[in-house]
Image: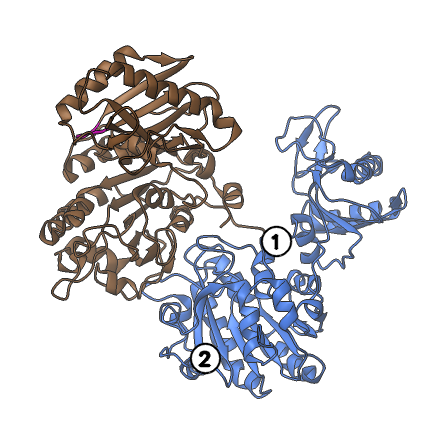
Chain colours: A brown, B blue
Amino acid sequence: MHPEILKTLVTKTDSKMILLVMDGLGGLPVNGKTEVEAAQTPNLDRLVAENVCGLTDSIDRGITAGSGPGHLGLFGYDPTEYEIGRGVLEALGVGLEMTPLDVAARGNFATRNETAITDRRAGRIPTELNKKLCAKIADAIPEIDGVKIIIHSGMEHRFVVLFRGEGLDGRIADADPQTPGLPPKLAQALAPEAERTAEIANTFIRKVEEVLKDEHPANTILLRGFAKYPDIPNMEERFALTPAAIATYPMYRGLAKLVGMTLLDTGTTVADEVETLKEHWESFDYFFLHVKKTDSYGEDGNFEKKVAVIEEVDRAIPEILSMKPDVLVVTADHSTPALLKSHSWHPNPYLLVNRYIRPDEVTRFSERAFVHGGLGRFLAKDGIALMLAHAQKLKKFGA
Amino acid sequence: MHPEILKTLVTKTDSKMILLVMDGLGGLPVNGKTEVEAAQTPNLDRLVAENVCGLTDSIDRGITAGSGPGHLGLFGYDPTEYEIGRGVLEALGVGLEMTPLDVAARGNFATRNETAITDRRAGRIPTELNKKLCAKIADAIPEIDGVKIIIHSGMEHRFVVLFRGEGLDGRIADADPQTPGLPPKLAQALAPEAERTAEIANTFIRKVEEVLKDEHPANTILLRGFAKYPDIPNMEERFALTPAAIATYPMYRGLAKLVGMTLLDTGTTVADEVETLKEHWESFDYFFLHVKKTDSYGEDGNFEKKVAVIEEVDRAIPEILSMKPDVLVVTADHSTPALLKSHSWHPNPYLLVNRYIRPDEVTRFSERAFVHGGLGRFLAKDGIALMLAHAQKLKKFGA
């Protein structure tokens, strides 16, 4: 449904919804069974038998979603309409608090000589040195021409920088020659409105080189993935919801913040997250509950540990249900089959628990079984209308 | 398919199609079965076994359709493109004949004092008094500034008024303060083109107050839901069809007229409607046959009586088939589960009977079974292309 029409139909009610995301849940068979199928999930199976399910495409058929677009879709936004630039995602991933004034970029410490970039990763300097260099830069260059500089170290040669000020623009080509042996490349504006930001970025690079002039091999930096903090209408405005996020990893907390969720402090286990849900149950009507490790073990190719995380979530289901949510959705942002050790394009299981579902004949929490689900196959972004409908938060369209 | 493309593909042929709509057909389980599943439908079951089925979303996933958009979709129009305003729907519902010149509004008789509206429903005056007052107004105010005034009484305090004249515009905010105790509110144009219409509406209100000056409690009126008769291309133009409507209730007759159907006189039972179909079989190539009571009993929460109406339709199936339609579709405009006592967002059964169907494995007329139908799940508005195709009324797209 077109978002502008949906917006005219939403109403604020007391009903409460939970979106439980097992990151990268869907898999591919190893010895005949996917991770979801290999897992013992008596609680989820019972929910499947009594409720309705289907499969979602995160973006579209055949398209593998990154974490940003994968979650935007789940939150009810068209991921092809709202772009989250690489720099922003990186900044959210290291836990930087961003504001609408910010342009973010990913940085590399690198090595240069008089005329060329000789090593794009400065020999992968130790993380400890990275931290020291970032602190030195932060001290020396707190701002440029009224624009605040915020730098955050990452692993080895990587860091993130935020440029914070009025009128900045992220449409800037990478300050990175890509191939060692080529001369350093300046940041270049891709639109007239971005010229001042590009100048500031280039001033920053020059000043950093002064700070690092006695360092080796980290004597310069490359900046890539310039991106402005995206302007996304929040979930309150779009869906009349008061949403909260329960997530352990910074990137997912950042993504939730992009759409206006309140970030709740939580622990590191699924049980911790469920505890947080219970503590804050009265204060919100939409909870995004994020489980990361299904994806992490998928990326590692660790089939067994991914299965174990699914079983850990299954054990938490009764506790989640004890809150009596009006709608509970269990799904994923994309698939991460251990077999592929990466995100994949395969569709995501989608289970919807509610008292007004029209039942289907599926009885097992499994990608293969969900092909026959009563919700059919749909785009993840359309899940929000289903959730709102079942929570009786949508008015009739027309009379 | 985009309507402009579809239009280039349609051809006029002798084949005949029936769209049999059981209003609000789909339900939700009570004691494990929906209304459709609880009904004994041997004739429909046989058709399902020998033909092809699927599920439709009236507007989109999760969206509950009103009667207007629900039917527009079934007739092959995008319900989000053509809006039928509240006033128009009300006018059609009381059986007023509208023309493209008309702006319709819903009216309330109300009570006012010197400064405020004190009762928005004039104590819910008896319908008989309403009729007398409407007659008095019709007599006293036949026209205003060349615009014809047509007033039609409704139940208790409700009525409908049509403003008929050149250049009128329905973009007018309600002349209704909403909350008793507030001063009367004038009709207000929402676009410059609507200013004259708003002035006429306000003159009408003033003149009505003169007519009612000695009445109590009905001494003023409120006007809401201003809407112009929508400009919808008719089915002949769009689909090269000569369509007729067999419907008992005024609103559905009105909706059919909006898309250019000829309205056939009929009785009140399903058997009467089928008799009308047979009488007029030779004169049209598309018949919209509307059964209202599935919806009415759904709205009443009367599961058993809704089941009985479905069974009544099932008994009429052999008589309908005796006409040997090239295409028969049995479906609904939206769901109305007795459990919810209201329209709902759950998808509609869609059964297509034709000699060129590709069969599926479904054998039972049931929402749950239709999940597995060969037509899959689609938007109601796309059903027209399926009907036309199976009736061999569509040319090949491209060479």
Q: Is residue A288 above or below residue B65?
A: above
Say which residue label 1 marks: B81
Relative to B337, is A352 on the left or the right? left
Q: Main secondary structure of the magenta part?
A: loop
Residue A281 visible somewhere in the drawing: no
In the displayed orientation, state which residue is furthest to the front.
A114
Tell me, yes or no, whether the highlighted magenta stretch contains residue A156. Answer: yes
Mark with earlier residue (1, 2): 2
Q: Amino acid at mark 2?
A: Leu
Which subunit holds the residue at mark 1?
Answer: B
Q: Amino acid at mark 1?
A: Glu
Residue B374 numbered mark, or none: none
Residue B84 visible somewhere in the drawing: yes
Tell me, yes or no, whether the highlighted magenta stretch contains residue A394. Answer: no
Q: Residue B276 location in percent, x, y?
A: 67, 79
Q: Is disc 1 placed on a helix, strand or loop?
A: loop
Q: Bounds of the magenta span?
A: A154-158
| Residue nearest the observer in this picture, B353 or B87 | B353
Which subunit holds the residue at mark 2?
Answer: B
Q: Where is residue A160, by image quadrant?
A: top left
Pair 1/2: label in front: 1
Q: Is residue B394 above or below residue A384?
A: below
- Label 2 near label 1: C-beta < 8 Å? no
Q: Residue B18 location in percent, x, y?
A: 59, 77
Q: Is disc 2 placed on a helix, strand or loop?
A: helix
Q: Are marks 1 and 2 on the same chain?
A: yes
Q: CA distance from mark 1 to mark 2?
A: 33 Å
